[in-house]
Amino acid sequence: MIQISNLSYSYDKKEVLTDISIGIRKGDFCALMGLNGSGKSTLLKVIAGLLPIRQGEIRIEGKNSANYSPTLLAQQIAYVPQQQDIVFDFSVWDTVMMGRNPYQGRWETESARDKEIVNKVLKQCHIEHLKERMLSQLSGGEMQRTLIARAMAQEAPIMLLDEPLSNLDIIHKYEIMGILTKLNRNGQTIIIILHDFPVAIQYVAKTIILKNGQLENYGNVIEVLSPENIRLAFDLPDNIQIDKSGNVSLATHHK
């Protein structure tokens, strides 16, 4: 569904991604992992069309993504940012309705179907009671569910999420992963940036690891996130223990 070939990307002559080639199949649920600065967010933004492809190629459903118009690409890919800067303080309802923009003409108002879809995803994300609330009044968990609901309203077959679990408590983390699991079971292809090894092992099927802007590992989550691979990919010292569930702890020595 997504074929990335020889992709490189630079900011001000500093190469952030180097010769990335990878294929994501339809229906994959894939964690994108790596140390801070490894290029994870940049890779998602390039796939989503938010950053231009300067070297290499990305094909979506066999078609070069550079040949998609912004509207058609938005019908294929929904992107959830790590955080939402509130420039204009919209309501939750209006924010989620923005997900329907790729299907509306320039002067069209929302249709009955648009309203039906927005109501549906508000319920799926358990935020229907917040629909009149303004974004500035939301908690971190409520904001993340609103952004995911907006992406769900796009009805795009691919969803990309940039660290949607950051700064959330454990209840909201598992609630969001439950929502994404249901979407994936219904056929949506999902790539999510995660930092939590146990969450990745519990929920996703595949894992991509980037290191210094290069593809370090890709494959089945259990194999890629083995204790040995985690230690190598994340440069963990010998006094850190990792179990098969991905839990990391400081080694203790008993006399």
Image: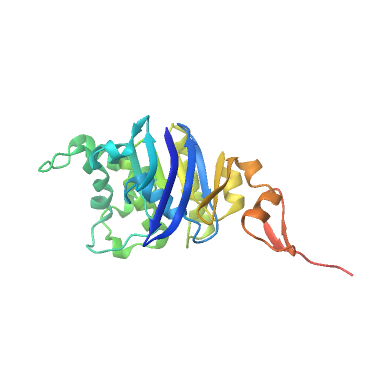
Q: Is residue 23 above or below residue 19?
A: above
* 67 or 104, nearer to the observer: 67
Q: Give the left or right position of residue 200, taking residue 64 as reference.
A: right
Where residue 207 appears, as percent x and y from the top left, is: 56, 44
Q: In this view, does 197 lie above or below 167?
A: above
Report if residue 71 is visible in the image.
yes
Q: Give the left or right position of residue 254, taking residue 138 as reference.
A: right
Where residue 185 appears, as percent x and y from the top left, is: 48, 33
* 92 or 3, nearer to the observer: 3
Colouring style:
rainbow
Q: Which residue is drawn at 45% across and 42% down?
A: 6
Which residue in the rendered view is the most extreme toward the bottom?
255
Q: Which residue is drawn at 40% across and 52% down?
A: 9
Q: In this view, does 225 lie above or below 3?
A: below
Is the N terminus in the top left, top right, bottom left or bottom right quadrant? top left
Q: Give the left or right position of residue 168, taking residue 230 as reference.
A: left
Q: Which residue is drawn at 43% across and 45% down?
A: 7
